[in-house]
Amino acid sequence: MVQRSAGNERARVLADGHVIPMLGLGVWQVRNGRACVDAVRWALEAGYRHIDTAQAYGNEESVGRGLREAGVPREEIFVTTKFVPRRGAEPVTALESSLRQLGVEYVDLYLIHWPAGGPTWAWPGMERAHEAGGARSIGVSNFGVDDLRQLLATATVPPVVDQVQFSPYEYRKALLGTCHQQGIALEAYSPLGTGRHLEGETVTRIARRNERTPAQVLLRWCIERGIPVIPKSTHRERIAENARVFDFRLSNQDIAELDALDHTRGTERALERKWWR
Ligand code: A2P
């Protein structure tokens, strides 16, 4: 049975009551500079209201410039950045620097970028950043099931998001199940497999059947599960194409065929044992 999202498909309410737009622009691997400023501005002009950056991307300054150039009121935009968990770093101080670079007074979501040094040590600092008002919501990224369990056992303010690599090919059912049980929204980065999944035979066939593009099919697969997505592009027409995902539905057959692309079976945990360990 396909689990469909209900209600307003364009946004999802997080466990702390804040609302996250289902579609965001990701800017991983976009260099600080004009290309990044333009991508953010084009996204906002195409109707995106969610931009996802990180301290580690080195482009917060350009994201901030893009936000200002687009002229959309700050309160209408959901901005995420991420804390780099390196030795000696402190979430409150790091966030102050991010806010300065972005030119904003708060971010909507502040995530621990990956669980380096263990999943719990940085969390009290994240809670302080939240309490001080610089981060409306707090969460994590690249955390697996065990990381979440450890964190939930010690957290005073629970994380509301786990942002991970997720697509039909990386359909992480155990993690999705844990997130669901714990009231954590799983958010999908690299929903297009950094572009690798766009040429797959199944995805292409389903796109043709729906008179849509492969990117739209992959994004729609997440959205119909209530999973926020942050596709990355620096091309204006692709940014616009990726936003046209709220005016069609995949059939149960489409979803079943996409589900069958999952290649994490039995290896889901391998996605959790990456270079940051
Ligand atoms: P580009 O930035 O040159 O447009 P993911 O979001 O999974 O990380 O995928 C991002 C990659 O997919 C980037 O290389 C991006 O290229 C490419 N991409 C994003 N949207 C589209 C699209 N609609 N059609 C084709 N390629 C796309």
Image (cartoon, helix red, strand yellow):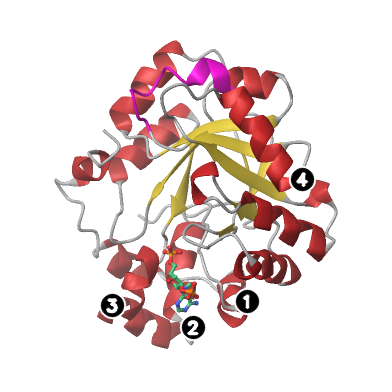
The nearer-to-camera label among 4 and 3 is 4
Q: Which residue position is annotated with label 4? A: 103
The residue identified by callout 2 is: 212
Q: Amino acid at mark 3?
A: Gly
SS for tag 2? loop
User: Dot 1, crowdedness within 10 Å: few (<14), some or many (≥20)?
Assistant: some
Task: Give the residue at mark 3.
Answer: 200
Along the line of sight, the residue nearer the viewer: 73 or 208? 73
Mark 2 or 1, which is nearer the eye?
1
Disc 3, ligand 1: is the CB inside 8 Å?
no
The percent position of residue 32, horizontal first and vertical second, equals 59, 59
87, above or below 141, in the image? above
> Callout 4: few (<14), some (14-19), or many (20+) C-alpha neighbours within 10 Å?
some
Q: Earlier in the sequence, mark 2 or mark 1?
A: 2
Marks 3 and 1, how far apart in space? 22 Å
As drawn, is 139 to the left or to the right of 268?
Answer: right
Q: First in sequence, mark 4 or 3: give its number.
A: 4
- Would you say residue 121 sits in the magenta stretch? yes
Q: Residue at x 37, y 35 (%)?
A: 143
- Secondary structure under tag 4 reads loop
Range of magenta residues? 115-126
Q: Nearer the viewer, mark 2 or mark 4?
A: 4
Calculate the distance from the C-alpha at mark 2 to the C-alpha at mark 4: 37 Å
Residue 226, image x, y percentages? 52, 51
**Quadrant including the C terminus:** top left
- Please identify the quarter of the rendering in which residue 149 is found: top left
Q: Is residue 89 left or right of residue 255?
A: right
**Label 2 to label 1: alpha-carbon separation:** 13 Å
Q: Label 2 sits on what residue type?
A: Arg
- Please state which amino acid type lies under the numbered disc 4: Gly
Give me the disc on residue 240.
1
